[in-house]
Image (spheres, helix red, strand yellow):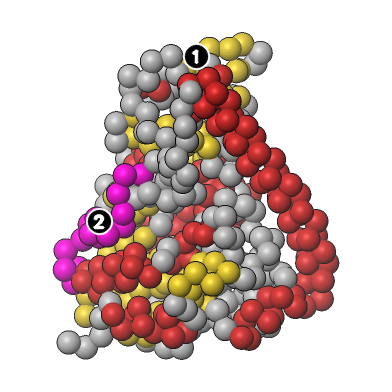
Amino acid sequence: MIPFQIHRRLPLVRRPFFQRDEAIAARDAAYAERDLLRTERDRLRNENTSLRAERDALSGAVPRPGAHPIPLSADTGALRVQVTRSGSQSEISPDMLADFQFRSGDELRITPLESEASVHRTPDGHYHLAVGTQRYRLPTRVVLTAINGYLFPEHLVVLTGAGTETLDVFGKAHVASYMKFMGLQAGMTFLEIGCGIGRDALQLIDVIGEQGRFIGIDVTWDSIEWCRKNIAARHGNFEFHHFDVTHELYNPLGLKSSLDFALPAKDHSVDRISAGSVFTHLFEDEIVHYMKEIARVLKPDGLAYATFFLYSTETIAAARRTNVTHNNLMFAYPFADGCFVNDSGYPTGAVAFTNEAMQRMISRAGLRLVRPYLKGAWSGLHSDPDDGQEVAILAAAPA
């Protein structure tokens, strides 16, 4: 059985979908894990609040509700990244980050204290710094894992929703699903929206071959840089593009909206597109924009594989009854017409749409459903799910 990922981009560990007999034990473990994660989340939120309060006391600044710190540039004055390695400490300025060789086990913090308090931190505890167009995501501890000849930073891998231990397994499972439901051939052009650190890209190298083309897009600058240095440098037919789109979890210092970017491909030039757990973190206007771009770049016989959370009476009832997900997906908060969010504090952490809303967006974008939605595992509704989330297989609508 192919393992499924329930939520592809939350920075938490995902589980495969379990059969019914295993689901009860998994659910109990998930409850315990959820409680630990909630405790850690609350601790980080409180720590962040305390640090900001201390910063404001030191600077005399009055914080604006919902305001992000001004992105930092190379002339950040006294701000330094302190690196503790094997008991020794060194400090580097933000403009040295691009060339600094971090090692597994390095412990990071921002100094001095008043500078640390001014730096944006996401709920996972990562620091965020901007140096010109570069967007750095720094963990408090660096973990590097060697897999298949590549050295992966764990803090970027978990943004895909799982750790390095399942990177290869889930990448292969995704490509198997693309093969099954869309078909793949050597020489195809494949575009991935939300490519992350290249989990699927690595599995597609041999599938599309040297005559094929891969185009990867993501809002996390560090992930794109990793892909450029490690994948594109070895495979000239693979390219990666950073969209500096602001997102509260994945690119909090981004300066633009998804609406500012076009997919980097010519009209009617792409055979296959994947958008795995992308629409689960966006709202209607941005989704419709991406869908319109998908319609523009798809070849007449091209297909797109777009995952999403389907909000229905059946899925929500099943989710409340089984609670098979580690992050307690219930979507209890109405947000917009046909749109529900799971966490009112971080709305884009997980977003679900009704069938009516999905159909509306697909129609607005000039796309069509090729087949009924693939069944998602996240709610526990289906004993034979096709993917961790529901999937819309899309093609361009007739002119």
Say whether residue 374 is magenta: no
Q: Position of residue 243 (x, y in %)?
A: 31, 50
* Residue drawn where x is 33% and y is 68% of the image: 285
Q: Position of residue 101 (x, y in %)?
A: 46, 23
Kind of residue at badge 2: Phe
In this view, 350 is above or below 111: below
Q: Quadrant of the N terminus?
A: bottom right
Mark closest to the chain's N terminus, 1 or 2: 1
- Residue pointed to by mark 2: 261
- Residue pointed to by mark 1: 91
Q: Quadrant of the C terminus?
A: bottom left
Kind of residue at badge 1: Glu
In this view, 89 is above or below 270: above
Please say whether residue 346 is visible from this viewpoint.
yes
Q: Quadrant of residue 376?
A: bottom right
Say whether residue 261 is magenta: yes
Mark 2: give few (<14), some (14-19) or many (20+) Cα within 10 Å.
some
Q: Position of residue 354 (x, y in %)?
A: 49, 81
* Residue drawn where x is 31% and y is 57% of the image: 258
Please say whether residue 179 is visible from this viewpoint.
no
At numbered mark 1, what does the secondary structure look like: helix, strand or loop?
Answer: strand
* Dominant SS in magenta: loop
Residue 187 shows which numbered tag? none
Q: Which residues are magenta?
A: 254-269
* Residue drawn where x is 61% and y is 11% of the image: 88
At numbered mark 2, what does the secondary structure look like: helix, strand or loop?
Answer: loop
Q: Give the alpha-carbon distance from disc 1 to disc 2, as whole Å.
A: 36 Å
In this view, 40 is above or below 166: above
Depth check, front residue: 238 or 59:
59
